[in-house]
Amino acid sequence: MSQLDNDQQQRYIELLESVPMETLQSNKQFMAYKQLKKRTRHKRLLQFTVTAAIIMIALISSIRVSPALAYTMAQIPVLKPLVEMIALDKGIKDIINNEYYEPINVSQTIDGKTLTITSVVADESGMIISYKLQSDEDLANFTGVSTEVKQQGEQIYASVGSSLSAQPEGTFEVENTIEVAASQGMNYSSQDFEITLSLHDRPEIVFDIPFTLKNDIKASKKYTINKQITVDGQDFTIHELIISPIRSELTMSIDSSNSKKILNFGDIRIYDEHQEEWGKIRNGYSGFGNYEDKQFSIMLESNFFRIPKSMTIEFRDIEAIEKADESVVIDFDKKEIMTQPKNINTELEIKDNFEIQYKILSSNKNELRSMFNHLIDANGETYYSNSATFSEHDNYLLITQKFDMENVKNLPVNPVKLEIARYDQYLNGVGRIQVELK
C-alpha cells in the first residue's frame, strides 16, 4: 500500500478537522472520528497511509448516515469512486475494509485531457475499474464516454459499462468507474489488460491505457441449492448461489407451466444467522439472461468476506400478470389498438413516429419505470425502446415512450405486439428458503 505524500496528508487533516460534530449521528461514528483525530497528533503522521481511511469505514455503521464523513472519505486518493458506491452496495464497503483493491495510477494525456486509471477491484465475476478524467475544457459540455477492456490485445468476453453523468458548469475533473460483468467468469491466465476510453463529443480523443494486475484474484465461493419455491401457486427454482467479492449471483429458473408470467423479482433479501441483511444490486449489473430462458441470474450484494454458517433467501414483491394479459397488439399506421388485456388498463394512445403514450395508475408511480421494453412486429422482428419521458400527476404517471427506428434496416410491419415488462401487480405471499453453507 503506497503512502500518502505530505500534501495529501495535510489535505486529509484539514478535511477531518472540517467535519461538523453535529453530523456524527451515531456513537460509532463519533468514536471513529475521535480515534482518527487522535492519530493525527502523533509524530507517526508522516507514515500515515490509506489504512487510516480503512479503519474509519470499519468503525462507521453506514457511510450514508453522515454525508460529512462520506465526503471526507471520498477525498482520499484511490478510494473516491468506491466510496460513492457504498451507498448503493454494502458489499463495496467490505471490499474497502479488507483492502481488496489494487492501486494502479497510470495516466495518459491527449490534447489537454488526462485519463488516470486509479484502482481496480478484480474477481472471477468481473472488475470495477476506477478512473479520473481531468480536462482543460468544461466537462459540462461532454455528454458521455465509450469504453472497452482488452486482454492481451483482444476484447474481453464480458459486459463493460460506464457512464458520464451530466456535470454542472465549471467542472474540470470527474471520477467514475467502469464496471465489467462476465457471465461465464473472468479469465486471469494473463493479468495484462488495456482500457480504451473515448469521449462522445471529441471522437478524435481515444485513450488507450495498459495496466497489469499483480495481486492474487480470490476464487468465488459456489453453493449448490436446487430448491423449488412456490408463491401464490407459481413455482420457481433456485439452482446455485455464487459469492464473489464484487457481487453475488443467484442462478434461477421459472416453471414454464405457471399460470402467470413473472415480470420482476422486486425485492430479494439474504439474511445470515444474525439477521444481517444483503439485497439486490441497485446500481450496476442486475443480472444475466431473461426470465424466459432455461436459467437466468440475478445479482445481489456480496457478503464474500464474512460468509455465515447459514443464510435465508427471501423473495418479496414478485411482480406478475396472467399470461393471457402479457401483451398489447397495436397498428401504428391505423393508430388502432387491436387487442388489449382484460385485466390491465393502460389507457394507451398511439402517436406519430412510433411513439406511444399511456398512464400508470400505481402506488409506485414515483419509481419512473416504463411498461414496455420492446415491440415485436408481424415478421417476428424485435425493436427496442430508446427513450421514455415521465410526467407526474396527482393520481397517475403519464409515460411517453419511443421506439428506436434510426438504427434498423426496415421499419416494423404492422400489427405489432407490445410485451408488458413491468406492471404494478404482485403475487400474494413471500418465498423463503434456508441454505446451510459448508
Image (spheres, rainbow, N blue to C red):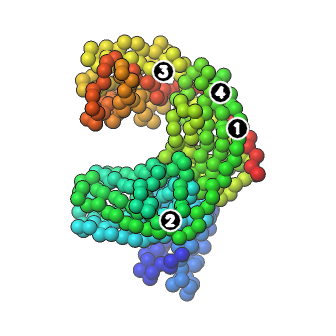
In this rendering, would 127 be left or right of 403? right
Look at mark 3 in the image and give the residue it sits on.
326
Nearer to me, 342 or 24: 342
Residue type highlighted by circle 1: Asn
On the question of residue 10 being in view, the answer is no
Question: In this rendering, is residue 345 above or below 215?
Answer: above
The residue under label 4 is 235
For disc 2, the neighbor class at 10 Å (few under 14, some 14 to 19, many from 20) is some
- Which mark's residue is nearer the viewer, 4 or 1? 1
Q: Amino acid at mark 3?
A: Glu
Residue 311, percent across and down?
71, 46
Q: At which x and y percent is residue 377?
A: 36, 22
Quarter the N terminus occupies: bottom right
- Name the residue: 34% across, 64% down: 208
For marks 1 and 3, the one nearer the N-term is: 1
Which amino acid does the dot numbered 4 rest on?
Answer: Asp
Say which of 371 and 14 sits in front: 371
Q: How many marks?
A: 4
Query: Residue at left 69%, top 31%?
Result: 229
Residue at image x 50%, y 57%? 127
Residue 237 appears in the figure: yes
Which residue has dot 1 on it? Answer: 226
Label 1 Cα crowd, 10 Å radius (few <14 / some 14-19 / many 20+) = few
Q: CA distance from mark 4 to mark 1?
A: 13 Å
Res. 166 mark: none
